[in-house]
Image (tube, coloured by chain):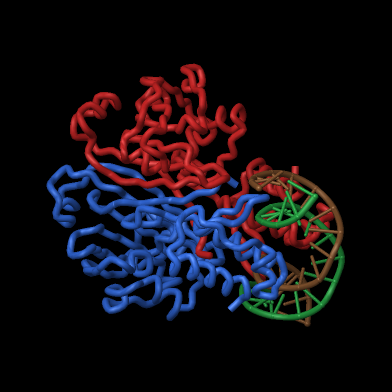
Chain colours: A red, B blue, C green, D brown
Amino acid sequence: MKKYEQIVQDIETYINTNQLEQGTRLLSVESYAKQYDVSKSTIIKALDTLEKRGSIFQQRGSGVFVRKQRRDDYINLLTNRGFTKELANFNITTQLIKLEVMTPNEEVRHNLKLEAHEEVYYVERLRNIDGNRLCIEVSYFPKKFVPYLNQEIANGSIFTYIAEALKLNISFADAYLHVDILSNTDAQKLELPEHSPALFLDQVVYLATGEPFDYSKLTYNYKYSKFFVQSMNH
Amino acid sequence: MKKYEQIVQDIETYINTNQLEQGTRLLSVESYAKQYDVSKSTIIKALDTLEKRGSIFQQRGSGVFVRKQRRDDYINLLTNRGFTKELANFNITTQLIKLEVMTPNEEVRHNLKLEAHEEVYYVERLRNIDGNRLCIEVSYFPKKFVPYLNQEIANGSIFTYIAEALKLNISFADAYLHVDILSNTDAQKLELPEHSPALFLDQVVYLATGEPFDYSKLTYNYKYSKFFVQSMNH
DNA sequence: GAGTGGTCTAGACCACATA
DNA sequence: ATGTGGTCTAGACCACTCG
């Protein structure tokens, strides 16, 4: 493990175990450098990482301070990559509805940058949160990246499988959101009245090479579709 | 202007004016260092900044590549700080509905960390996009940070006023989203049928000191509430 | 193996906040 | 005036990709 990663982890643990309030001042850059016997730049790298994650904020001339997200039943849009990790503190269950190899339509091809003949795995799943319908998830994985997928894998975390078994390097994602009325079939699947609203999230996930390897369309039950995003001004 | 900021700007301009495709390879770190006659670290700092903004991605051992957002009628949730800058390419107009000094309720006090007696400016505005109702915006600014506000300012960009005239240092923001059905009065304001869905965005914006200075509640017309978020895995 | 990005150093100097 | 974070350097060495 890299030095700065260890420091990031230590500080994060320190904040959590001591349940520090937003605005609590941490040690100075120099103090941390001495404490860990590393150069100032390494501390700065660690602090920048924590700032990117929304764990702290830094104020020039003044110090390093704790930043806290306060509504914790909200899904973090920035770290949301599947549910297995993100909503670990909730009871999320998965129901596999369909798993097959198919030739995708134009929309999917465009988002995954596929040629007309290329095949994909189609996965349709239902996510439940504490026994209630959370969302419908429809995913497409090009066969050229994910040559094999079975029911057992699809019942668990496909992302973990892709990262660990296939050793693919997941790098970045684009997420698009909009709101609309549910179709009747989707309302039924989510156990909601007809014409209920829903949040639609389209997501394209890319490998380190820049190639898209997952296009997913999620339809959220509006009752549980609570998201948050933390941003910095610089 | 700092060296790395200049480089960020140059590269961003280069990508835009040449309309480079996603995946286009840029120069190597070393080449840029030579070209600008700066150290490698300065280039890395510039590239990290671009990566944070979602303009590029870097692959160790391979190079630096262009990253592009492809659906451009979507509002970037990460840079969204008011509309004046964000949706510059659309025709956004503002209608001031109400502007007054008041003592806020518990919800607002909590989000702005105010004592019971502290007063705020209450601003209610309607945003239109190309002549159509985009959203209702209700904002609260503590008087201790924003001692004066008038109709003229509220008709323009309050954020620009706060940053430039009051010289307050806007630093970071937390945004919370959820979906629900519009109230009848809100549906009327947005010129939508009763029981239309809507996206609700609550936003707390903080100064560099970590003090919250704005709590805003936005109610989006679902027809125009399209958002996107770009994220990195590290 | 050559070339690429990433980590890390030790230190100079700058910009800013606070008292 | 002091202490804080931020910029920048020159260079060593590491980790990864790809031909």
Tell whether B219 sits left or right of B177. left
Q: Quadrant of residue B29?
A: bottom right
B184, above or below A40, in the image: above
B225, above or below A87, in the image: below
Q: Position of residue B21 (x, y in %)?
A: 45, 57
Is residue B14 or residue B103 the one in the foreground?
A: B14
Tell whether B94 sits left or right of B170. left
Tell whether B22 sits left or right of B59. left
Q: Position of residue A160 (x, y in %)?
A: 56, 30
Tell whether A113 sits left or right of B126. right
- Who's the residue at 47% across and 42% down the image? A212
Res. B51 visible in picture:
yes
- Who's the residue at 42% across and 30% down the image? A120
Res. B114 visible in picture:
no
- Who's the residue at 67% across and 68% down the image? B42
Q: Quadrant of residue B32?
A: bottom right
Q: Position of residue B86 (x, y in %)?
A: 37, 65
- Who's the residue at 49% across and 74% down the image? B168
A207, above or below B36, in the image: above
Quarter of the picture holding the N terminus of chain B: bottom right
Is residue A178 or residue A167 the one in the foreground?
A: A167
Q: Position of residue B73 (x, y in %)?
A: 31, 57
